[in-house]
Amino acid sequence: MLKKFSLPLVLVFLAYAFWESSDFTEIAAGIALFMFGMLCLEDGFKAFTGGTLETILRKSTDKLWKSLAFGMTSTTLMQSSSLVSLITVSFVSSEMITLAAGIGIIMGANIGTTTGAWLIAGLGLKVDIAAYAMPVLVFGMVFMMYKSKTHRGIGYLMLGFAFLFLGIHFMKEGFESFQQSFDLSEYGMTGFVGLLVFTLIGMAVTVIMQSSHATLLIIITALSAGQVSYENALALAIGANLGSTVTIVLGSIASNLGGKRLAASHVLFNVITAVVAITFIGQIAWTVDHLAAMLGIRDDDFLLKLALFHTLFNVIGVILLTPFVPKLETALIQYIQFKPKGIEQPLYLVPQALETPATVVSAVKMEVRHLFDNAYGLLAHGLSLKRSTIDSNESLTEAVKYTRRIFPIDVEDLYEEKIKSLHNEIVTFIADAQQRESTQAATEQLYVLRQASRDIVEAVKGMKHLHTNLAQYGLSSHMAVRERYDQIRIHLAEILRELRQLLNGEVDDLTHLSLDAIRVSSQKARKKLIDELDEMIRHRRINASIATSIMNDEAYVTDIVNNLIDACSILLNEPKTDAADALHLDEKELAEISKEKSLPDA
């Protein structure tokens, strides 16, 4: 309801304000240009996220200090903590980096965002940057005329910086004109009450504008024009920091657990930093005065002192919380948990993962692995075995032999809830990703991952048919029939165990050989069962109709195994080394090995 009426109210207010004050129009135009410049910068940097940024991110976050440095550097370059935060959410959500690394980046971004204040206070309000903006704007449009993604990315970056400069210029001019007709400093407040009130105002402005950079621009330009006091400006800067958490919180609403945990850490960090800054405002201000003197900043240069204050209290927050990042990660994982619903929900297919090709591929791969885990549980129960039994080193022969009942599961319902719904989400997500700009490598990976998802679905469909006869003949009093179905159950359970161990182990050049061995073992087991059935039929030890049912069920098992192996080979992402290619067996070689191995048993 609030969203429904907020836009009309904002439009009416702006129209009235434009009618009443030309100075306000100039200030608002400056803010609009500044924020549009930030959007252009985001689009420009996104043009270069087809691999380079992702590679740097993965290599720069294996240690906490590297994460802090990456967050600080990337935010300084992009001048957009929002973009860095949202990209970080996407990487944590798709498990490309750890939660601790994400927390480090967010903390570093908080320091990096303070460089904007230094830029505005030290250069933007003391140099006619509008004169520099014009040629940059022209060069930016020249690059935008090219269709190349790289050229357009450069064009967006140049347009972004140009509009940032123009926004600062118009806001400076607007506040200086505004000062002549209306003095906001008359409404200044001192003491602790003033500190709290102006902190809330700074927070509210940032929430509305969705940009702490834009809020700092307003604060610094208002301070330069004498519209706010230095003391109130410090409180506004604290509030801007608090308000900046809203962007990442909104971005995490549709994200998975990783994104929600990261957003919670950001809120916690900024709240603690703000509480420390408010509590020790006098001591921090005193430190700023002494540091300013050491750096050669004049006592009356409140603009640079404000930038120094903004940097100092963020650095203090990082210093205080850095030692507790591992404990914070543990606590967030423990207390922010996923609550399952009726229909299986995707864990990794969140909107933030669509930001870059690398995060799309990673998210889809993790979701296909999630689908495999669901299928693994369903197939285990379809065999009337517990997952824990297959996961353990317990004898599968003994577990099958002493089965007292066939699990009364509805495979069809479980298929709809746990498999089909998730597969549909994967296909839809890949379709959404294909509508965006991507790389050829990412497109090819998404194609094979979609096929892996399809293979898993087909494997579960095979269990739907198999379970019907297992329920009827699995505990048959006819020992010959019971033994054949025991063979089928043991065979498939062993395959599930081996594939599970491969997926949970380390991938190397011999991984594909293990998959080949599993395939050979499956073919050998099938041939052995068929030979035994032929002999039983010849000696009339088993009814031909029941034997036919067993043969059909063995065919379902073969299809299940082949589909699972095909899916696992994709999930394992086998290394394409020359050694691996040399060792790989083709279909003809597999058939020959299977035939040779079966001869001693004939």
Image (spheres, helix red, strand yellow):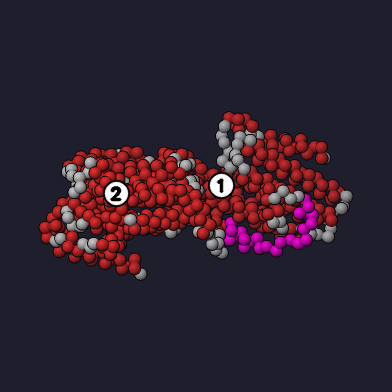
Considering only order in the chain, which callout, 2 or 1, is on the residue closer to the N terminus?
A: 2
Height in image: 434 above or below 472? above
In the rendered structure, which amino acid carries the disc numbered 2? Thr
Closest to the observer: 543 or 525? 525
Q: Position of residue 297 (x, y in %)?
A: 22, 44
| CB contact under 8 Å: marks 1 and 2 | no
CA separation in Å, label 1 and label 2: 61 Å
At label 1, the amino acid type is Gln
Tell me, yes or no, whether the highlighted magenta stretch contains residue 407: yes
Q: Nearer the viewer, mark 1 or mark 2?
A: 2
Vertical order, 243 against 151 (above or below): below
Residue under circle 2? 287
Can the viewer see residue 465 in this picture? Answer: no
Indicate whether residue 239 is drawn in magenta: no
* Secondary structure at numbered mark 2: helix
Assign a secondary structure to mark 1: helix
Q: What residue appears at the point 82 percent right and 40 percent down from the top-left corner?
A: 602
Q: Residue furthest left?
A: 180
Q: Residue at x 25, y 45 (%)?
A: 292
Can residue 264 be seen here? The reply is yes
Looking at the rendering, in which quadrant would you find the N terminus? bottom left
Residue of label 1 = 451
Q: Nearer the viewer, residue 17 or 408?
A: 17
Instruction: Write down the region rendered in magenta.
Output: 397-419
